[in-house]
Amino acid sequence: MDSDTIEKTRQTAALYFQGISGPTPYALWKSFDADLARDLSLFITGRMYARQKLPHPTRQLVTIAALTVLGKTEELKLHIHAALNVGCDPRHIAETIFQTFVYGGMPATNQALEAFKSVLKEKKMWPLPSKDDIPAESV
C-alpha cells in the first residue's frame, strides 16, 4: 500500500475515532488476522472514509442511517462517536435516526435512539438542551 493511503488512514482514524473507549472493530479483526486487519483498515479508513466526495459529517449521518435500519447498535455507537467527533450536531443525528423509521421500523429506531442516548451519557452530553435553550440563530 502506498504511503499516501497509510497517512490518510492515520489522519482519518484520528479524526473519527479519537476518545472512543472499548474494543474497536480493528482490534477484533487484528486478534484473528493482523495482516487482513491492516488491509481492511487501509481500505475502509484510508480509502473509503478519507474520500472527499462527501463531507465527513454527511458521511457519518449516512452511516448512522444505514446502521439504524440494519439494527447494528454496537457498530452504530462507534459511528455516533465518530459523527460527534467530526462535528455533527446531536439534533441532526437524532433527526437522521428518526428519518429511518419509515424504512427500518420503529423498533430499529428505538434501539438506535437508546444507543445514541448511551453515547451522549458517556460523553456527558445528556440530556440535550431543550430547543428553548438554544439560540435561534443556531437552530
Image (cartoon, helix red, strand yellow):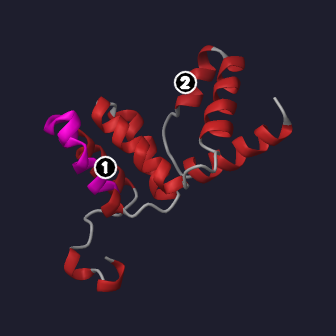
Local secondary structure at mark 1 = helix
Question: Main SS of the magenta segment?
Answer: helix
Question: What label sits on residue 116 in the rendered view?
Answer: 1
Task: Relative to 74, say whether 29 is above or below.
Answer: above
Q: Are marks 2 and 1 in contact (CB under 8 Å)?
A: no
Q: Quadrant of residue 77?
A: top left
Left or right? Give the position of 20 relative to 65. right
Range drawn in magenta:
93-110
Closest to the camera, between mark 2 and mark 1, is 1
* Front-lying residue, 44 or 31: 44
Judge whether residue 104 is colored magenta.
Answer: yes
The residue under label 2 is 28
Residue 55 figure quarter: bottom right
**Is the residue marked by circle 2 packed among few (<14), some (14-19), or many (20+) residues within 10 Å?**
few
Q: Residue at x 22, y 34 (%)?
A: 104
The amino acid beneath tag 1 is Phe
